[in-house]
Image: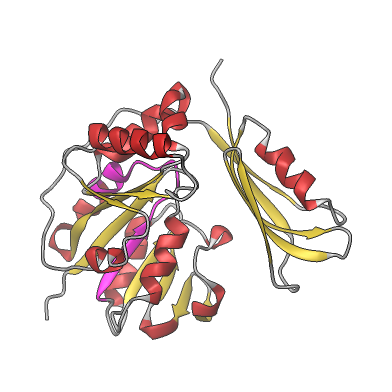
Amino acid sequence: MSDTLPMTIIAGYLGAGKTTLINRILRNANGQRLAVLVNEFGALPIDADLIEAQDEDLIALAGGCVCCSYGDDLMLALSKMRTLDPKPDHVLLETSGVALPGKIAASVGLFGNDIQMQGIVVLADAECLPDHLADSYLADTIIRQLAAADLTVLTKTDLATADQRQNSRDIVCQHAPRATLLENGSEHLHEVLLQDTAVIPPIQHNNDPHRIALTTRTVIPSEPVDAQDFAKSLADQNTVVRAKGHLIAKPDNTMLTLQVVGKRYKLTKADATTTPGIVIIERHDSA
């Protein structure tokens, strides 16, 4: 058996659905030992019922899969993947929402033949993509993400209007002309991503500086809140691009999970033992 590790990069702007896709792949691993690399466990994308054990920066998952936090040291995390016994069959690297996957792929290329890049998958939110591309502050990053894609996935098509879906298709085709386009709901998407047969040729990437300025803060309400009002207040702030976490809601102290993407928000019931706290990602326009 070859010592080369196949790796796929999963990218896309904040809220595009990377979390959902990663969990779907893990649930359909069909015996493959997958290693998932994420930036940090503070925003862990793995469904709780898939987690078997946790030890520092490595989490054991069902079916022989693992999840590893890489933070700023991707090379160290990849080296750790190569020392695992048994070795993973495939590595999935989930980028942050504002990362440029082409630059990450170029960094991985420094590993030589130890890591075999299978390609870059870029997700795009069909409802939000047209508005994002109309925003000069966001457009540059999203266009660069799409330009690096070998496979694009149009997500959240059920939330988009017919015009938004078509506009998003047109945007993806324009900025990722060489990429295969799939749409949300493709039942065999996980099979496409886990193929080990086709080696993607090296990609040339633009090294211009990344110009989006974002900050992250955590809010922990000191007492139960009106969940709808709290969620709407975040969604109504033009500077908030993403928020997620848990809160205690009035009037019955129910623990809820909050997700905010742009102007859209969602509240769902969470386990009562969950720790409250909302991570908020905000943009800051240059003067």
Asked if residue 30 is positioned above or below residue 133 in the image, the reply reads below
Residue found 43% across the figure and 83% down from its top: 62
The answer to whether residue 206 shows anywhere in this view is: no
Instruction: Using the image as rendered, state which of residue 123 and residue 74 is in the foreground.
Output: 123
Residue found 40% across the figure and 64% down from its top: 22
Instruction: Using the image as rendered, state which of residue 78 and residue 100 is in the foreground.
Output: 100
Q: Quadrant of the N terminus?
A: bottom left
Residue found 35% across the figure and 59% down from its top: 93
Residue 132 point in image, percent of width and height: 45, 31
Task: Tell me where residue 258 sits by quadrant.
Answer: bottom right
Q: What colouring style does the render use?
A: secondary structure
User: Can you name the residue that lies furthest to the top here?
Assistant: 287
Relative side of 52 to 188, left or right: right
Residue 85 point in image, percent of width and height: 30, 84
Task: Tell me where residue 112 sits by quadrant.
Answer: bottom left
Q: Which residues are magenta?
A: 89-106
Residue 13 point in image, percent of width and height: 43, 43
Instruction: Using the image as rendered, state which of residue 28 and residue 223 is in the foreground.
Output: 28
Task: Tell me where residue 133 sits by quadrant.
Answer: top left
Residue 98 painted magenta:
yes
Q: Quadrant of the C terminus?
A: top right
Residue found 71% across the figure and 46% down from its top: 231
Residue 54 painted magenta:
no
User: Can you name the residue that lies furthest to the front here?
Assistant: 162
